[in-house]
Amino acid sequence: MVPTRELYWNIDGHLLMYGVFVVVLGIFFYGLYRHYTLWRMGKPEARLNNYAQRIVQVLMGTLLHKKIFRETFPGLMHGFIFYGFLILFIGTLIVGLQADLGWQVLYGNFYLLFSLLTDLFGLLVLVGLGMAFYRRYFLKPDRLDNRADDALVLAILFVVVITGFLLEGLRMVATQDPWQAWSPVGLIFGLPWRSLSMESLKTAHSWLWWFHMLLSMGFIAYLPYSKLFHILLIPANQFLVDPQSGIALSKLDLEDEEAESFGVGRIRDFTWKQLFDTEACVRCGRCQDNCPAYLSGKPLSPKALTQDLKAELYNCRGTVGSGTGKALPEAAAAQESGSLFNERITPETNWFCTTCLSCQEQCPASIEHVQKIVDMRRYLVMTEGEMPGELQLTFRNLENNGNPWGLGWAARTNWLEGLEVKLAEDGEIGDETILYWPGCSGAFDERNKKVSLALVKLFQAAGVDFVVLGNQEKCCGDLARRLGNEYLYQMLAMENIENLNVLGVKTIVTQCPHCYNTLKHEYPHLGGKYRVLHHSEFLAQLIAKGRLVFEQGELKSITYHDSCYLGRYNGLYREPRQVLQAVPGVRVVEMPRHLETSFCCGGGGGRMWLEEHGQKINMLRTEEALSTRSEMICTACPFCLTMLGDGVKTKEQQDFVQVRDIAEVLAESLKQ
């Protein structure tokens, strides 16, 4: 379906068309400017670096539809529309170059092949639009909320394509095109016109061409004012996205004397990129469909939160001065006293997030949800002092005793009694010495102490040279940071980093994905740079080197639960499974949701220390694990171990199904 202009071109019409196009561009850029002035309200943030990586992000996200194709029906639907219009756009460009500039781009058979290609892809657009209409107005999935703009967009796109095919059909009938077989769809659309006279064909073509062109130009002008703006915003957002967003949270400058507050309490406290994020959202609802808080009935939806933030941003539209991006005096005063938290965005909403990162993993627009939520928590905790009551005790325990339970700091080494384990304080650490970091759970929690003991047994069996910090180790600070207490996080982190650097630590192994993520990705921002390994990685390496050998045990089926901070945060999916499969007789059974779509246990983001009302997230995951009918549920995270263990007990299945860490499975299977 190669577009053509009217059969007998008129120079006045030619100039008029380009005059209209200039007006269209003016409307388009004015709309773009209005959005730009809103984005400029945000704080500065550097995102223009690592260009090669960012280009790859766009290629994978936009051109290859990496995330969109994860779901078959909506993936094909969007793919048909996107790739169809991409080919039609190229076809229009080629016609413009050949007809207006005289540049012959395609010759002979290549032109015919491209004509066939555009026809077929135009047909795919119609199929995709039909799928979109059926899905939105007949299937009506929960995650979609229909607005008038959605129907208008589908209607405009449909009419643009239909009129294009009608024009092609008219042209071929009027000219008796000998190559019309290479435009089969247009040929079909031309059949009803064959009875018209040549004069009628010319008139119909002329009027329809102008309608088609004006509608197409209206489509361009409408872009910045509609949902269609995502055509430009999403590729831009994919270019600007930080792959570490949410994984390594932004560092607050706590010594900034000019800071009016910490965190985000007003819309202008976000960075320009975070404001840009809100407009890139097209309400597809993939984040909501994978959010453990939403799916367990909590009043938090990543989609709704993003849309609410966009609404707050649009409320500031009148506050932006002409050409300056600064608030006008009267509006600025209103914004100074206006809080982001209102009946639309309540403070309570932020505390339901488990920071599982599933929203970001599933979002095809590359929206960064977690950092925004933590920024709002920071404001509530550090500026307003507003938080759930139980957090006050947790923060006090962390500050006074270096662990969330408030147990005496000297008790951190109690789990080592009777073990021949060296303490780091006993001597200088060599370059090949491993620092084993059990974390607070591994040192204080009775259930997770068993995991620590299993790891020590495995290390000793493999002849690993390792030490522990003992009483010098404090909470890594992940809990405090994810709950918005950046001051407490930095205090704990700096004390740990000082001890680690003095001792000359090079390599750290930990069983806690939360410690792992913090030590690996966030400590470097404070001067703590180490080689950090999760115990699943380290054990997989020991097994590969033949330093751990296991004996044949009873045949058993194990379902493995992917920890959010191990999987989505750090991409460690293969290693835990390799560890389990190294044990003779073990058969790994996957849950319906695993790998990137694994469902959260409910303990991340500080939720382990917060009361949960209503349906429990850990129960949803436990039920899914039990549905596999496996004899054992395994994980590689102390939080997940606790949450799933509690779930199995609540279901009264503890006599039939064991809950184990992968290290325990290995330790029990060691060849004596």
Image (cartoon, rainbow, N blue to C red):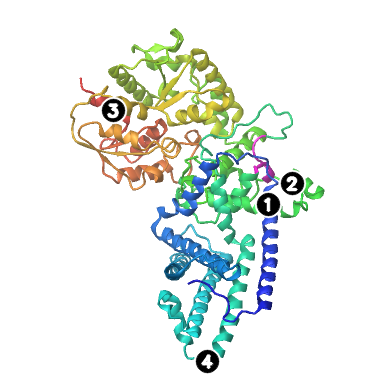
Q: Quadrant of the C terminus?
A: top left
Task: Report which residue position mark 1 lands on.
Answer: 36
For the magenta stretch, what is the residue range? 262-271
Between marks 1 and 3, how big is the CA–CA gap?
Answer: 54 Å
Q: Is residue 22 above or below residue 171?
A: above
Secondary structure at badge 3 equals helix
Between marks 2 and 1, how big is the CA–CA gap?
Answer: 19 Å
Task: Report which residue position mark 2 lands on.
Answer: 335
Dominant secondary structure, magenta: loop
Q: Which mark is residue 544?
A: 3
Q: Label 2 sits on what residue type?
A: Gln
Q: Label 4 sits on what residue type?
A: Ser
The crowding category of the residue bearing disc 3, from other C-alpha atoms within 10 Å (few below 14, some 14 to 19, many at least 20), is few
Q: Is residue 344 visible?
A: no
Give the residue furthest to the right. 329
Q: Is residue 108 above or below residue 422?
A: below
